[in-house]
Image: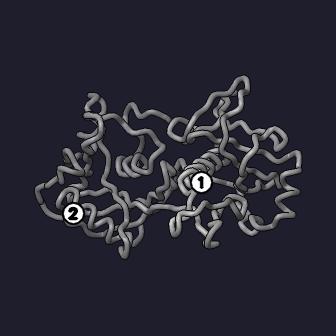
Amino acid sequence: MTETPLEWLALARGTLDRVALRRRDDAWLKTAWADPRTRVLVVEDGRSLVSHDPDPALVFVPPGDAPPGDRWLLGVDPAGVAYFGTAAPLPAIEGTEPAGLRRVGALLNDRDSGLLTFVVALEHWHATHLFCPRCGAPTEVRSAGHVRTCTEDGSDHFPRVDPAVIMLVTDAADRILLARGPQWPADRRSILAGFVEPGESLEQAVAREVMEEVGLAVRDVRYLGSQPWPLPRSLMLGFTAKADGDVPLRPDPEEILDAAWYTRAELREAVEAGEIVAPGPLSIAAQLIMRWYGGELPNMPHF
């Protein structure tokens, strides 16, 4: 038996064809850059320009107005328009403001949300991989921004993505397990999550993280969906899991400050009383919680 996948994930809505086979086609890239229809998305420290007329939308510049520097092919839309990204100081354009994924990722349309997610991930990777991890020599941008090649030993290096599992754990009474990390505000709660370790399956990672963080054994680990989380480089893989029996929670103090079970009524009351802040829809955690709850929580923000 499989569960119905998650229907909507804010950062997993990209609509462009990434045209990977064109990344080493210099003639095609040159023609695309010369096309007046081509659009360039400038990113600086994880933010790009956004307009509100009336809904949030990314603001692009034509190639002729793009700042100098490396450019990365992001994809082509159904009309054949090519999109590139580049990291540079944001231009001054009237009626726009800088915004990042946390602020507008859930508000942008499918195309723009996918583009901003993509360009933010590439910006961070390029900024942190200027040197070869094998020999320390400088690297150069190749393959239209999707490879960095060592100038000394010729080795190719590709964008890094760290897989992380995030799991909604329920018990026999269909209560949800929520926890608070030591660095979080007093009113913040979420479901458990953690990075996948080498030589470990996703299902094994779910079981290990739950045991490590709260001392529970789980079963029926079921995959529901994934979304990129380029803050800075994760891929979040969402699961459900079940815990049997009335086993006391044993939070790991280094990872979990407190943890508790909630019925739907208890969670609603805690949110309405301001004891727990309802999550916005950007994270996969919020989507998993809403799926269990049966809809939006009270006072849930729409960003």
Answer yes or no: is residue 93 visible: yes
Q: Is residue 45 above or below residue 156?
A: above
Q: Image quadrant for the N terminus?
A: bottom left
Q: Is residue 293 above or below residue 136?
A: above
Answer yes or no: is residue 13 visible: no
- Is 198 or 176 nearer to us in this picture? 198
Q: Are marks 2 and 1 in contact (CB under 8 Å)?
A: no
Label placed on residue 242: none
Which circle's residue, 2 or 1, is located before the other in the chain?
A: 1
Q: Residue type at mark 2: give it.
A: Met
Q: Residue type at mark 1: give it.
A: His
Give the image location of residue 146, x and y in percent: 65, 61
Label placed on residue 211: 2
Residue at image coords 84%, 52%: 33
Q: In the figure, is residue 11 to the left or right of 34? A: left
Q: CA distance from mark 2 to mark 1?
A: 36 Å
Residue at image coords 79%, 53%: 82
Q: Which residue is mark 1?
A: 126
